[in-house]
Amino acid sequence: MSTLTAKLPKLPEIKLPEALDLDEAKKPAFAAAGVVDLYVEQVKALPTDAKKLPADLTAKFEAARTERAAQLKAVPAQLKALPTDAKKLQAELTARVTKAQTEATAYYTKLAARGEKLVAQIRRQPTTTATIAEGKAAVKKAEASATAAKKATKSAVKATEDAAEKLG
C-alpha cells in the first residue's frame, strides 16, 4: 500500500478563507479519494489485462504482417510511378515558388508605394520644409566659410613666402 500512496499526486496546501463553505471545503478531499479509487480500480484490472495480452499481441502481429505483405506487393507499382510523381512534384513546387515570388513582389511594391506616400507627406509638412531651408542655408554658409578659409590660407602662404624672401 505504501508504494501506491507514494505514486499519488501531492495535494497543494490550501489556505481556507475565514468564511468557510463546507461543501466547497470537502471537494479537494473527495477528489483525492476519487483519485485513489481510480488507481485501485486500474490495479485490480491488471491481471485480467495481462491474460488478454498474448492474444491481443498475436492478433496485432498477424494484422501487421498482412498489412506489410500488401505494402510489399505495391512497391513495384510505386517504383514505376516515381518518375511521373517526381515530375508532378517538380511542377507543383515550381508553381508554388513562382506564386510566392509574385506575392512577395506585389507586397514589396505595396510597401514601397506606402513608404513613398509617407515620405511625400513628411516633405510637405511645414517643419520639414523649414528644416530643409535651414539646411540649405547652412550649406551655403559652410561653402562660404570654406572659400574664405582657402583665401585666408593662400594669403597666409603668400605672406609667409614674402617674409621668407625678405629675410633670406
Image (spheres, rainbow, N blue to C red):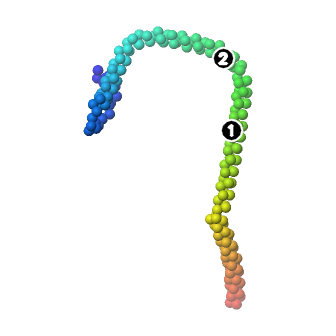
**Is disc 1 placed on a helix, strand or loop?**
helix
The CA span between labels 1 and 2 is 35 Å
Labels 1 and 2 touching (C-beta < 8 A): no
Asked whether the viewer can see residue 135, the reply is no
Q: Quadrant of residue 159?
A: bottom right
- Whole-percent x and y of residue 74? 66, 15
- 112 vs 58, left or right, is right
| Residue 126 percent across, percent down from the top left | 64, 65
Disc 2 marks a residue whose amino acid type is: Val
Q: Is residue 59 found left or right of 123 in the rendered image? A: left
Residue carrying label 1 = 100
Q: Which circle's residue, 1 or 2, is located before the other in the chain?
A: 2
Residue 108: x and y in percent read 68, 46
Q: Give the quadrant of the C terminus.
A: bottom right
Corner quadrant of residue 77: top right
Foreground residue, 47 or 105? Answer: 105
Mark identifier at residue 75: 2
Residue 64's tag is none
**Looking at this view, is 23 or 159 the one in front?**
23
Quadrant containing the N terminus in the rendered view = top left
Label 1: few (<14), some or many (≥20) within 10 Å?
Answer: few
Q: Residue at x 70, y 37 (%)?
A: 99
Per the image, label 2 sits on a secondary structure element best described as helix
| Residue 57 position (above or below residue 127) | above
- Above or below, 71 against 115 in this view is above
Q: Nearer the viewer, mark 1 or mark 2?
A: 1
Q: Percent from the top left, x then y, of residue 38?
A: 36, 20
User: Which residue: 29% across, 29% down?
Assistant: 23
Residue 11 seen in the current view: yes
Numbered disc total: 2
Q: Give amino acid for label 1.
A: Ala
